[in-house]
Image (cartoon, rainbow, N blue to C red):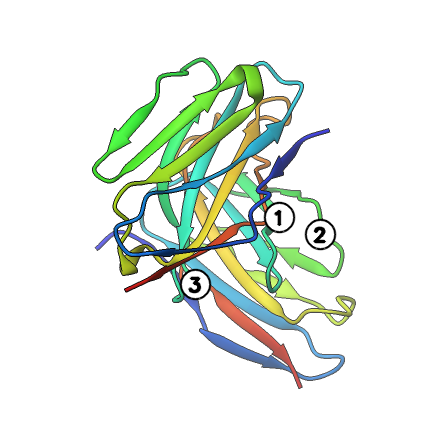
Amino acid sequence: DGGITQSPKYLFRKEGQNVTLSCEQNLNHDAMYWYRQDPGQGLRLIYYSQIVNDFQKGDIAEGYSVSREKKESFPLTVTSAQKNPTAFYLCASGGAVRGGETQYFGPGTRLLVL
Amino acid sequence: AQKVTQAQTEISVVEKEDVTLDCVYETRDTTYYLFWYKQPPSGELVFLIRRNSFDEQNEISGRYSWNFQKSTSSFNFTITASQVVDSAVYFCALTPWNTGGFKTIFGAGTRLFVKA
């Protein structure tokens, strides 16, 4: 089945620790995105990638890093510099390099700080 | 400024009632895209509809319908004869073209409760 997978479903982070959230898609989409959702709020864009080996900062990139070495994969690292990482993280992919396309979402990863 | 406002934080209806979720957007772009997504309790966002700024035709899909009015910068969503399975958070979103069409702005969402 085509779709987007995110792992793990729940992730616990200790103070000062970097953690990496996985996102994989088999939809053959060029663009991929990471969003953060806080309780009772909408989604905010962290990073996006239009194409392999390229990515751009979104509105709240501080404390996060990404890589895009393969078309199918767009992992997000939450670094120790991110002081308030507790949130629900959603990965999405979209069809075309030109933009404006529909984004399809994965099931999300809930990150909690111990 | 680019912005999406969903003024209704929560709506509660009884099954079979019709309900309209409001969405007002702001952008200076003449080319943009509007979306509605549904987020059930599982958390995954489900795509419902995409509209570009040049297509003001209303759309109906089963019990769902959308009313796009550029004159009032609104893109409202109506569920007819609501069902318990419609209970979810609904997000309206805007993708302006001036940033290349990759930066999407989401509203804060409207939580819909449908009671049996």
Q: Amino acid at mark 3?
A: Gly
Which is more foreground, mark 1 or mark 3? 3
Query: Which residue is the site of mark 3?
Result: B43
Separation of marks 2 and 3 at Cα, in angstroms: 22 Å
Q: Position of residue B35 (x, y in %)?
A: 45, 35
Contact (Cβ within 8 Å) of mark 2 with mark 3:
no
**Viewer-side residue, B102 vs A19:** B102
Q: Amino acid at mark 2?
A: Ala
Establish whether labels 1 and 3 are both on one chain: no
For marks 2 and 1 on the same chain, the one whose residue lies earlier in the sequence: 1
Q: Position of residue A40 (x, y in %)?
A: 59, 60
Q: Position of residue A82 (x, y in %)?
A: 75, 66
Establish whether labels 2 and 1 are both on one chain: yes
**Quadrant hosting residue B1:** top right
Q: Would residue A99 be seen by someone viewing this image from the given angle?
A: no
Contact (Cβ within 8 Å) of mark 2 with mark 1:
yes
Crowding near pointer 1: few (<14 within 10 Å), some, many (20+)? many
**Quadrant hosting residue B94:** top right
Q: Which mark is residue A61?
A: 2
Name the element at disc 2: loop
Query: Which residue is the site of mark 1?
Result: A47
Separation of marks 1 and 3 at Cα, in angstroms: 20 Å
* Label 1: chain letter: A
Q: Which mark is residue A77?
A: none
Q: Is residue B28 above or below residue A91?
A: above
**Viewer-side residue, B112 vs B37:** B112
- Residue at x 27% of width, y 29% of height: B60
Establish whether labels 2 and 3 are both on one chain: no
